[in-house]
Image: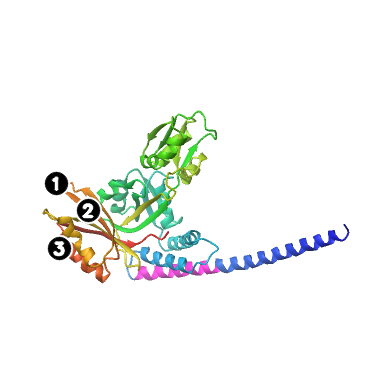
């Protein structure tokens, strides 16, 4: 015993010394990181002053942020994941931009919705947010200039498009300035932690649909009631011991609810795409998408003739959706996503051909593809 005790003491002493050395290295790195972030913020302020002198009112440039994030991910070698590394740099850029010109972002509310999560994922935490009750209200608030940008949902990988968002582009002059892809995880939330005595499950209709199989299997006898948003569902659950809500982490934290079961969505890859809307022409970033609003002339094969230039010139169409035009019965318009920026020479030539062929042509914007 007399021989092993000193050995253990020596090992413990060596371990403590090693930990102390590692912590000192971390402290030194933290000091350097803080100094570099402060220097970056100073450069951001200098850029803001130069823009102001040149009369440039657009301090936020989506294409520039997308380029930075792509470069960050290209050089990331771990151990932090791309998602975590992108999040760190988004927050640094968000804080620096707030020194230049604080942004205010409207989103489809109330607070605690996935749309708010998407807005904060894209712009970072250093922005002001304005929750609004309907998609058309978000458009109007941006059009009025009361906020700089808006964030609205446009499609879900399970349940398809959000028609109201598409329809607003028929009457709005706003442009699409960016997109956000958000992995959507639904949790079963309640005031209590037990699974007995529940009378209903409330959530947004799309969330109920995205969890249909799980609900059929685990809560077959519980009534399902649609409400206006997941956050509203969480609010109702917070006031009633017999009501369960399906919502995300933000709503759970906001209304102090327990997660009785997590990630109950039927598809693990459940993803919602959101659009950033504003009065801004986004410049090319090197990996862009363009969204068009089109209708063909009233003749046989109109849609084929309208879209043929895309195939002839090797432009990839990634999505097409039809909506009633609201101008005439049985007349439809098409929302088309293509790869590339409208300023790219090849894309510009094809868009000119589409405009000549179309009865209605409107470019809703070119913008950077979402950086996950």
Is residue 371 shown above or below 156?
Answer: below
**First in sequence: mark 2 or mark 3?**
2
Element assignment for label 2: strand
- Name the mark on residue 356: 3
Q: Nearer the viewer, residue 65 or 84?
A: 84
Q: Main secondary structure of the magenta part?
A: helix
Which residue lies under the disc numbered 2? Answer: 334
**First in sequence: mark 1 or mark 2?**
1
Q: Nearer the viewer, residue 337 or 279?
A: 337
Count neighbours of disc 1 (C-alpha within 10 A) and say few if under 14, some if 14 to 19, many if 20 or more: few
Q: Is residue 43 magenta?
A: yes
Q: Position of residue 293 (x, y in %)?
A: 22, 56
Q: Position of residue 89 (x, y in %)?
A: 48, 63
C-alpha span from label 2 to label 3 = 16 Å
Element assignment for label 1: loop
Q: Report if the CB atoms under discs 1 and 3 are less than 8 Å apart.
A: no
Which residue lies under the disc numbered 1? Answer: 328
Q: Is residue 161 left or right of residue 361?
A: right
Q: Is residue 256 visible?
A: no
Q: Position of residue 244 (x, y in %)?
A: 46, 35
**First in sequence: mark 1 or mark 3?**
1
**Going by the picture, which residue comes out furthest to the right?**
2
Residue at image point 26% right, 67% down:
314
Is residue 98 shown above or below 253?
Answer: below
Range of the magenta residues? Answer: 35-53
Q: Position of residue 21 (x, y in %)?
A: 69, 67
Q: Is residue 361 magenta?
A: no
- The quarter holding residue 102 reads bottom left
């Amino acid at each position: 015993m007399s021989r092993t005790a000193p050995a253990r003491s020596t090992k413990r002493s060596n371990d403590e010394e090693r930990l102390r050395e590692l912590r000192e290295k971390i402290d030194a790195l933290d000091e350097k990181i803080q100094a570099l972030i402060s220097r970056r913020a100073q450069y951001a302020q200098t850029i803001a002053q130069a823009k102001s002198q040149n009369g440039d009112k657009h301090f936020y440039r989506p294409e520039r942020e997308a380029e930075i994030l792509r470069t960050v991910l290209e050089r990331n070698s771990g151990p932090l994941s791309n998602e975590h590394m992108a999040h760190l740099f988004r927050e640094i850029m968000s804080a620096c931009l707030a020194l230049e010109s604080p942004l205010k972002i409207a989103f489809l509310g109330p607070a605690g919705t996935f749309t708010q999560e998407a807005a904060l994922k894209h712009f970072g935490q250093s922005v002001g947010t304005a929750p609004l009750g309907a998609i058309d209200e978000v458009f109007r608030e941006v059009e009025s200039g009361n906020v700089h940008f808006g964030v609205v949902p446009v499609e879900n990988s399970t349940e398809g498009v959000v028609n109201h968002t598409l329809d607003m582009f028929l009457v709005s002059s706003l442009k699409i300035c960016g997109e956000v892809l958000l992995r959507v995880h639904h949790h079963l939330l309640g005031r209590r932690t037990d699974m007995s005595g529940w009378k209903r499950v409330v959530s947004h209709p799309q969330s109920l649909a995205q969890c249909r199989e799980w609900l059929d299997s685990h809560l077959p006898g519980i009534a399902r009631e649609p409400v206006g948003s997941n956050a509203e569902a969480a609010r109702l659950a917070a006031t009633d011991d017999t009501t369960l809500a399906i919502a995300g982490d933000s709503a759970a934290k906001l209304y102090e609810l327990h997660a009785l079961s997590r990630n109950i969505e039927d598809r693990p890859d459940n993803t919602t795409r959101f659009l950033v809307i504003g009065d801004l022409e986004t410049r090319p970033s090197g990996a862009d998408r363009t969204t068009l609003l089109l209708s063909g002339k009233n003749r046989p094969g109109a849609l084929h003739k309208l879209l043929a230039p895309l195939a002839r010139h090797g432009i990839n169409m990634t999505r097409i959706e039809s909506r009633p035009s609201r101008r005439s019965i049985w007349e439809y318009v098409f929302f088309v996503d293509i790869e590339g920026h409208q300023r790219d020479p090849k894309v510009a030539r094809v868009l000119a051909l589409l405009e000549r062929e179309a009865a209605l042509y409107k470019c809703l914007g070119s913008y950077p593809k979402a950086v996950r």
